[in-house]
Amino acid sequence: MQRGSLGSVKPAAASVIGPAPRRAARYAASRSGGHNRSAATRTAHGPVPQPRRQLGTVAAASTTDVQPQAPAQTPPPEVKYAADISILPVNKRVDVVRVACRDRLPEVEFNQRHGTTSNAYLLKNTSGAYEVLIDVPNKVFDVDFVGQLASAGATSTLTTIIITRLSPERLPVLARVLEACKKEGLQLLLSNPALQLLNERAAANEALSAALQGVKVEAINRGSDVKLAGASKGLRFVLIPTPRWPDLVAVYSEQDNILFSSNFFSAHTAMAGASSATDSGGWDAYAADWRNYYDCMLAPVARQVATALDRLNINATSSPEAGGGGGLAQALAPLRRLAGLVRDLTLGADDGVAEPLTVGAIAPMHGPVVRQSLTELVGRYAEWTARQVEASGVAAVAVLYASAYGNTASLAQAISRGITKAGVGVETLNLEQCGQDELEAALDRCSGFVLGSPTLGGHMPTQVQTALGTIMRNANARQVPCSVFGSFGWSGEAVDMMERRLKDAGFRFAFDPVRCKFKPTQQTLQVCEESGLDLAQDIRKKKKRNERVAAEKLSVAEVGSGKALALGRVVGSLCVLTGRDGDAEGAMLASWVSQASFNPPGLTVAVKQDRAMESMLPVGASFNLNILAEGKERAVMKQMLKPFKPAEDRFAGMDVQRSESTGAVIIPDSAAYVECTVVSRMEAGDHVVLYAQVNDGKVLNQTGQSAVHYRRIGTNY
Ligand SMILES: Cc1cc2nc3c(=O)[nH]c(=O)nc-3n(C[C@H](O)[C@H](O)[C@H](O)COP(=O)(O)O)c2cc1C
């Protein structure tokens, strides 16, 4: 899903304006463009221009930052987000330049409410001067990154800039950094795919091209090594590509035992305190953000993540070099066991197992430097990945897509998230990057598939057309549920074409095609996530019979022991939990509810992990808990238990009100309702327990009792 490789530009909001005549002419001229992917290696005096890879017959439009759109004419103003920038110490030789933005960025899919940070790192040599810079932030942040480097004295001393992931949005900042740091011997290191993007953009962008003049640009490979002046140990590089980020590279400082992990081990949160760069709040403070980032960005590509983790082979330890306080070293037997499982599943015969990296701290691209929760997070990554790889071994949906500007990619990501939530594996293939054999193999083993395409020039791009042909010929693909999706600008033919061809050939659709104009809104992403859930549940139905038999056996055993019957005596108030997130709305029945605190007033609710609503309830989210009234609960229950289409109005036909503060639904027939904010979350078996503070509430039925949910057995609700 690398936007840049398709010659793309910033994904457009629906308000973004149409092609200037110059861009349109360039687009027309590039329609016959080819597919040159020849690897760039080293250029001593600036990059060698290379042709951009293009989406089929329709080349990506331009190298400017505006996405073409049919009717309108003026380019949109550049969006900037307010952010703070600060330089904080990680240890005595490493500082983080942290850009913290408390807004919820629409650019970041599935960003929770904690904003985000974009981290860059400065490494000092033995004389205490900054010598190496790792990464630069995205241009959307309204900060003076170069000014900050200059006032810290870094621009005059930096000799090496390393980029662990390049996106078109980082290039303008990189160009300014290069200009400011320009000096004899300045070198820029980045992986081969990133170098290709850089070369493509530089060929059409004078400022970038000028900034690269005189800079030694070098592609990172396995043997690359950088030593800081006076240091005995150097920096090592580990390539960790994923389909979404084919250029990803991690940097390991042997001297500091710090792993600069790029997007791995990241979290979208600006929660870290102003004076601390690290995860000082510990696991509880960041667990939900780390998990959310993993689920959204890495779970759909778990096989590649497994390979990357194996290449990193992290041996988490407490290291004073990394700034650790001691006492963290732990035996990682369970992690090693899981890593072994992952290795067996993912590595070919030729892949050697890397020497372990002794890591005392992980310095990611987003979120806090991981020190206190290091062992836990590394262990969880192995566990989540092993579970995901295992799930995809049992049943996996192939998510196939192409995307020039990232919009169809966002839809693919949201569908993938819905599928993984339901415990079904996902195999994501970016059709622009995968080979024919890879596609056929994925189709042969999939239990379902979805195909996504943008509309470009009234068509689907060639890669999608070719994939569609492969799908039509594949015997297994014909037997499994499927659907299609895509982003478009004005006419949107691609999704119709894919739908028609598959339906005409007798393929069975598990959900209605998803069409999205330009960039998806929260509601469209919700539709996608719930569609993914539907597809996964469709797949699981096939296996249901066996599962039911197994469950019955289990119940008999459990009943025999009395444990499940006894647990069934635990009762709770029958409630409807309602929430709102932008234009997306959610509701679910909940009876695993309990008061948990007097002061401040608080309660807990257990939400099953595969519930669509679960992702609407991160820490900081608000919701209403409608406590149903005895004798009036039946109609509400019936309404809530009806099957709903993705994002369909849960309250259609019901007379409801809405809270001013939360925006969520109030059911007037309830005994009472309370308005709450999620304070913390705890993974608990197959549920997540939310602890929420009660901010307000009202009794709606003065005389009635609350409805209580009595159960026969503790194995279901
Ligand atoms: C060169 C070019 C041609 C396009 N042609 C069409 C078109 O014929 N019909 C349409 O509905 N949208 C068209 N669009 C708009 C794209 O479909 C829209 O930007 C979409 O969000 C791209 O999805 P993606 O981000 O997944 O690539 C075109 C865009 C570009 C850049």
Image (spheres, rainbow, N blue to C red):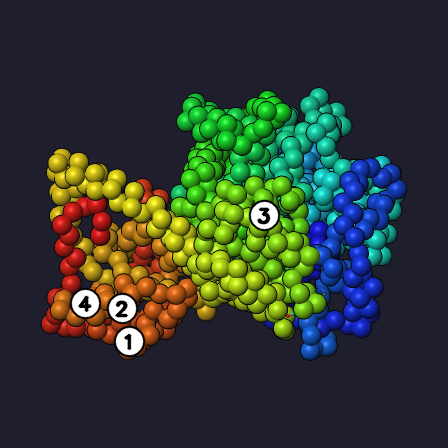
Q: Which residue is mark 2?
A: 639
Residue 409 image position (x, y, % from top left): 58, 56
- Specify the amino acid type for callout 3: Leu
Q: Tags 2 and 1 in contact by the CB under 8 Å rule?
A: yes
Which type of secondary structure does the marked residue at label 4 adopt?
helix
Residue 207 image position (x, y, % from top left): 83, 56
User: Is residue 485 found left or right of 4 in the rendered image?
Assistant: left
Does the rendering let one see residue 101?
no
Q: Which residue is mark 3?
A: 429
Marks 3/1: CA distance?
42 Å
Q: Tags 3 and 1 in contact by the CB under 8 Å rule?
A: no
Which type of secondary structure does the marked residue at label 2 adopt?
helix
- Specify the amino acid type for callout 1: Met
How many numbered circles are shown?
4
- Find ligand 1 in the image and state its quadrant: bottom right
Which type of secondary structure does the marked residue at label 3 adopt?
strand
Q: Which residue is mark 4?
A: 633
Marks 1/4: CA distance?
13 Å
- Tell me which residue sits at (83%, 64%) in the image: 29
Q: Nearer the viewer, mark 3 or mark 2?
A: 3
Q: Which residue is mark 1?
A: 654
- Nearest to N terminus: mark 4 or mark 3: 3
- Specify the amino acid type for callout 4: Glu
Marks 4/3: CA distance?
46 Å
User: For this rendering, which residue is in front, 172 or 394?
Assistant: 394
Marks 2/1: CA distance?
9 Å
Image height of 188 relative to 104, above or below:
above
Which type of secondary structure does the marked residue at label 1 adopt?
loop
For the residue carrying disc 3, how many other residues have a C-alpha within 10 Å: few (<14), some (14-19), or many (20+)? many
Image height of 388 relative to 473, above or below:
above
